[in-house]
Image: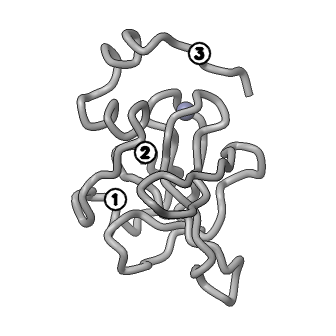
Amino acid sequence: MQPAEKTDAEWKKELTPEQYRVLRKKETEPPFSSAYVSKNDRGVYVCAACGAELFSSGNKFDAHCGWPSFDRPVREGNVIFTRDTSHGMDRLEVTCARCGGHLGHVFDDGPRETTGKRFCINGAALTFHPA
Ligand SMILES: [Zn+2]
């Protein structure tokens, strides 16, 4: 993928205030605030900032945690993992490989019958494209 490099001012102009806080300032949206939490339509979830394909509805599951949850990204390499020790926790941050936007975190308590991973993703970081 081509990297999408923009200045902070450009991102602030292009994104909604909520998208900007999540994607660029790494904030977490309140649980159950995104309409995508309970969305079951078939399609693909792309990065709200740069449009990169990130997650498929086929890999979405209901984790009852309040954020859209997936057991894997749509393609290896479309997301980047970084250790995040902020807020007194040791977590693995998930960012968009194309624009570096913050998406959420990945945990090891996902569905055992598939990957065992739970990609806990802010709905504000995603845009849904129906199949
Ligand atoms: Zn992106």
Q: Residue at x 66, y 48 (%)?
A: 82
Q: Is residue 96 above or below residue 32?
A: above
Q: Residue at x 42, y 15 (%)?
A: 8
Q: Amino acid at mark 1?
A: Tyr
Where does label 3 land, which residue?
5
- Quarter placement of the N terminus: top right
Q: Position of residue 24 (x, y in %)?
A: 42, 31
Element marked by disc 1: loop
Crowd tier of the residue under label 1, counting other residues whose Cα lies within 10 Å: few below 14, some 14–19, many 20 or above: many
From mark 2 to mark 1, how far is it between C-alphas? 9 Å
Left or right: residue 64 versus residue 43 is left
Element marked by disc 2: strand
Q: Are marks 2 and 1 in contact (CB under 8 Å)?
A: yes
Q: Based on the displayed image, in which of its 4 quarters is residue 126 positioned?
A: top left
From mark 1 to mark 3, how far is it between C-alphas? 27 Å
Q: Position of residue 112 (x, y in %)?
A: 66, 88
Q: Is residue 95 above or below residue 99?
A: below
Crowd tier of the residue under label 3, counting other residues whose Cα lies within 10 Å: few below 14, some 14–19, many 20 or above: few
Given residues 36 and 118, the one toward you in this image is: 118
Element marked by disc 3: loop
Where does label 2 land, which residue?
126
Given residues 42 and 28, the one toward you in this image is: 28
From mark 2 to mark 3, how far is it between C-alphas? 18 Å
Outermost residue, front direction?
Answer: 88
Q: Amino acid at mark 2?
A: Leu
Where does label 1 land, which residue?
36
